Amino acid sequence: MTGVVAMAEYIAGSEEAFVQMMNDKAQELGMTDTTFKNCHGLDEEGHLTSSYDIALMSRELLKNHPSVTKYTTIWMDSLRDGKSQLSNTNKLIRTYKGATGLKTGSTSLALYNLSASATRDDLSLIAVVMKAPSTKIRFENATKLLDYGFNTFSYKEFGKKGDVIKTINVNKGIKDTVEAVLEEDCGTLIKKGDDKNVEQTLNLEDTISAPIKKGQKLGEISFTLNGELLSSVNIIANEDVEKNNLFTIMKKTYYSWINLLRY
């Protein structure tokens, strides 16, 4: 506890200021059922959260700070030249296939809690258990939740960042075409067996006029299942294409003549 308070004071100047930062971040993540009253998580009046909010916080940590799993997947380690041993309180790290973390916690009021994360076949899941009556039951319940997720759903990848969707003609440009590529990775969680029913809609012009900037949005691609949107991603230009000017027109004409004379 004292170490956490010391860290909070170092980062924000005081524990109170750090707690305000925590609450601001919680609101930014959409954690509407969460109010932090301290930085260490021990019982305090009004210090509240929910399983959904813990899942949001866990996802943020795993998605934007994936290096955390280098530590959350360690089962046992030593300190002081081997004189002290530390074991992970998350037993799923040792017993559950694909476990990546994430955090256990318990107090006299909150009882036994767990945010459990695991990845199999490119599908990452988070199971949150709160107020379990024993540490054994929290691990059993988390295992059931994760098993259900992996048995029922899969991750369907539609494309990766930079994949070329189409080559578009360019009017009045120094180049005649530009490649239209995915701005981000594109995929979704989907019930197993439903992937064959996914429909793709491409909203993209065949021709565009220069000038074009690298990263400029050219259109979008979306994927639906039974009319419900699963995923969509912007399609962007992968390079600059400047507009023709007198010099580039003359240059292009010159090379056209040269090619005609050559043959």
Image (cartoon, helix red, strand yellow):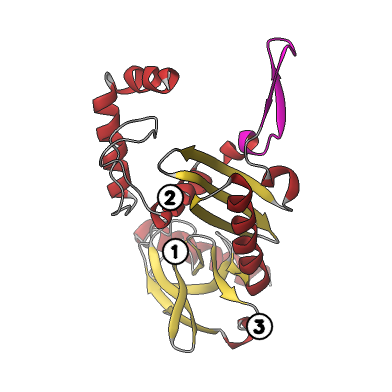
Going from the N terminus, do you reach mark 3 or mark 1 first? 3
Q: Quadrant of the C terminus?
A: bottom right
For numbered disc 3, what is the local secondary structure? loop
Q: CA distance from mark 3 to mark 1?
A: 31 Å
Q: Which residue is mark 2?
A: 54
> Which residue occupies the foreground of this view, 171 or 147?
147
Going from the N terminus, do you reach mark 3 or mark 2 first? 2
Q: Amino acid at mark 2?
A: Ile
Instruction: Pinpoint residue 55: horizontal percent, then vertical percent.
Output: 46, 53
Q: Amino acid at mark 1?
A: Ile
Instruction: Pinpoint residue 2: horizontal percent, then vertical percent.
Output: 41, 18
Q: In this rendering, which labeled residue sits more in front, label 3 or label 2?
A: 2
User: Would you call the spot at circle 1 few (<14 residues within 10 Å), some (14-19), or many (20 or more)?
Assistant: many
Q: Which residue is mark 3?
A: 193
Residue 183 seen by the camera: yes
Task: Answer whether residue 77 is magenta in the image.
Answer: yes
Q: Quadrant of residue 158?
A: bottom right
Q: In this rendering, which labeled residue sits more in front, label 3 or label 1?
A: 3
Q: CA distance from mark 2 to mark 1?
A: 35 Å
Residue lying at 39% horizontally and 35% vertically, measured from the top left: 41
Q: Magenta residues, as a range?
A: 71-87
Is residue 209 found left or right of 76 in the rendered image?
A: left
Residue lying at 65% horizontally and 58% vertically, measured from the top left: 143
User: Would you call the spot at circle 3 few (<14 residues within 10 Å), some (14-19), or many (20 or more)?
Assistant: few
Q: Which mark is residue 236?
A: 1
For numbered disc 1, what is the local secondary structure? strand
Residue lying at 63% horizontally and 63% vertically, measured from the top left: 144
> Which residue occupies the foreground of this view, 8 or 49?
49
Residue 117 seen by the camera: no
Q: Amino acid at mark 3?
A: Gly
> Which residue occupies the foreground of this view, 133 or 70?
133
